[in-house]
Image (cartoon, rainbow, N blue to C red):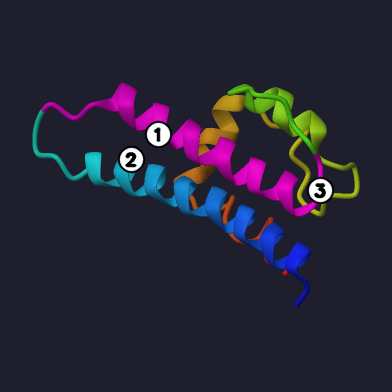
Amino acid sequence: MSDERKELEEQVFKWIEIAEKDLILANHAFTLSSNVPYRLICYHAQQCAEKYLKAFLVSRLIDFPYTHSIDDIIKLCPPETDISLAHLSTFELTCMVFDSFISFKLIKEFF
C-alpha cells in the first residue's frame, strides 16, 4: 500500500471513528431512565450522519468546505453514488443513522 493510500485510509477512518463516537453517545442517552436529552440525541445523530458523509467524500478525494449542513455535503456526493441521498432531507438522513443505514456501506466499497 502506498503512503498516499495509507494516509487517505487513515483520514477516512478518523472521520468514521468520530462518527461512531457520536452514535454511541446518542444511543447511550436513550438508555437513561429519566430526563432523556432528546435534543442532544438529535444533535449527535446529525453529527454522526455528517461525519459519515465527510468520510465518504474524503474516500472519493472530494474537498468540502467547513460546514455542518448535511444538505450542502450531500450536494457534493457524486451522482453515481450507489445510494441516492439527494432526495433525503436533513431530518431523514439523521434518522437513518439510528437504523444503521449510513455505515460502512458508503465507504467499504472503496477499501
Front position in the image: 28 or 95: 28
Determine crowd level at label 3: few under 14, some 14-19, many 20+ residues with C-alpha closer than 10 A: few
* The magenta stretch spans residue 38: yes
Mark 3 vs 1, N-terminal side = 1
Q: CA distance from mark 2 to mark 1?
A: 6 Å
Q: What amino acid is labelled 1 in the image?
A: His
Q: Which mark is residue 26?
A: 2
Give left or right: position of 26 versus 36.
right
Instruction: Specify whether residue 6 is painted magenta.
Output: no
> Magenta residues?
35-62
Residue at image point 75% right, 77% down: 1
* Quadrant of residue 72 within the rendered picture: top right
Point out the frontmost of discs 3 and 1: 3
- Mark 1 = which residue? 44
Query: What number is the disc on residue 61?
Result: 3
Which percent across, then down, holds residue 51? 56, 41
> Crowding near pointer 1: few (<14 within 10 Å), some, many (20+)?
many
The reply to whether residue 44 is visible in this rendering is yes
Magenta span: predominant SS is helix
Q: Position of residue 88 (x, y in %)?
A: 69, 31
Above or below for 12 versus 34: below
Q: Earlier in the sequence, mark 2 or mark 1?
A: 2
Q: Secondary structure at mark 2?
A: helix
Dot 2 and dot 1 residues touching (CB under 8 Å): yes
Q: Nearer the viewer, mark 2 or mark 3?
A: 3
